[in-house]
Image: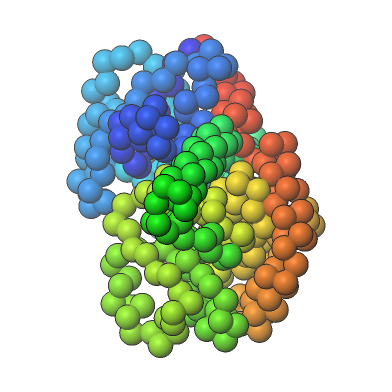
Amino acid sequence: MTVYFYHTQDTERIVREWRQGTFPSHFLYGALQLADSGIDVVWHHQKHTYRRLRDMLRATWKILTCRKHYDVLYATHTYGIEPIILLRAMKLYRHPIVVWHHQPIVRARNPLREALARCFYRGMDHMIFFSRKLMQDSLLSKKADPRRMSMVHWGADLEYYDRMKEQTRSKEQGTREHNSPQQSSCPLPPAPCPFISTGKELRDYETLLQAFHETGLSLTLFAEKRRQAYFEGLRLIGPNIDLHYGDRPIPHEIAQLVARSRCVCICCQKSNYTVGLTTVVEALALGLPILCTRNPQMPMDIEAEGCGFWLEPGDVEGWKDRLRHIAAHPEEAEAMGRRGRRLAEQYYNINLCGKEVANIIKRYET
């Protein structure tokens, strides 16, 4: 059996860097693990410009003119393949479509848009959701068919993080030996930062920075370069904030610093989907405690699992209390991290994700 794998990111670059050991495979949503279940992959290669019409036309043309045999179109997003989905709804595209649905299905207020949406959703043979809450919310819409919906445990590439941690540990050990008094007077690498915050989607920076401003605790913060003017306008960036900017996804560079931290902070705005999930599964894989804005859409309850604490949206005082608690109780924080790692090994890892996706795809084997 063969699938055509569609992604909104540059799969060619990701696969190349994954082979080099510098990109985790979970950003390919289990496509690399499908071979373990006897499923071959035809890769969709396209560098997206994020100009909607142009990307849509290019993706549609590439899929419709693909000369390689495949049985199912497996997509990480509906973005860019809307015409293909509509063709499938009209029975003009013959391959079943299995697609990840990132947000809950909702009812449109406009009757015409609702009618078009119902037609559109008939073109997806199966939708994969990140959590059961997303599925439950979707079922409130008449467009949702529970027979065509599944929840899959999307999780991190544990082998990548284990290998990366070992390499980082070896480099640190080598640097310590090189910097011994008998050999050199060069300083050691910077000490691990107690707290780190990464990610870019719907982040509540003001609440997070206010909490660190008032506690004086150290934070390493990664943000998009386009947000530089925003941060320069804030008066909350003191000497305890180590601020970094990036232009494109650089998970390897970020993961190396996250691994040297003691706690992951995920401060987000309210949303109706799993904002912050990527950062959560990375923290679980690295065995780090988590402080996260409460999000009922998350597939796991980090507080009930004993691997972190929930904070209410905009709760500066709550963040201050939890930050101080983690800083004052390192043994408890390490225990949280160990429980998080066990959770990742049991449920939230890319190998299990690949198996669950394969089981869904095989339903459409002819």
Q: Horizontal and vertical percent for residue 79? A: 36, 46
Residue at left offset 43%, top offset 70%:
242
**In the figure, 38 relative to 360: above or below?**
above
- Compare residues 229 and 329 and report the one nearer the observer: 329
Q: Is residue 359 left or right of residue 123?
A: right
Residue 272 in which image quadrant? bottom right
Above or below, 310 relative to 260: below
Q: Residue at position x 38%, y 84% from top?
A: 234
Residue 87 coordinates in the image, percent (x, y): 35, 33
Between 307 and 38, the residue placed more toward the observer is 307
Q: Is residue 69 above or below residue 188?
A: above
Compare residues 122 and 159 and report the one nearer the observer: 159
Please identify the quarter of the rendering in which residue 344 is found.
top right
Residue 151 appears anywhere in the view? no
The x and y percentages for residue 217 are 57, 76
Relative side of 283 to 5, left or right: right
Instruction: Look at 34% across and 25% down and name the residue there.
Output: 43
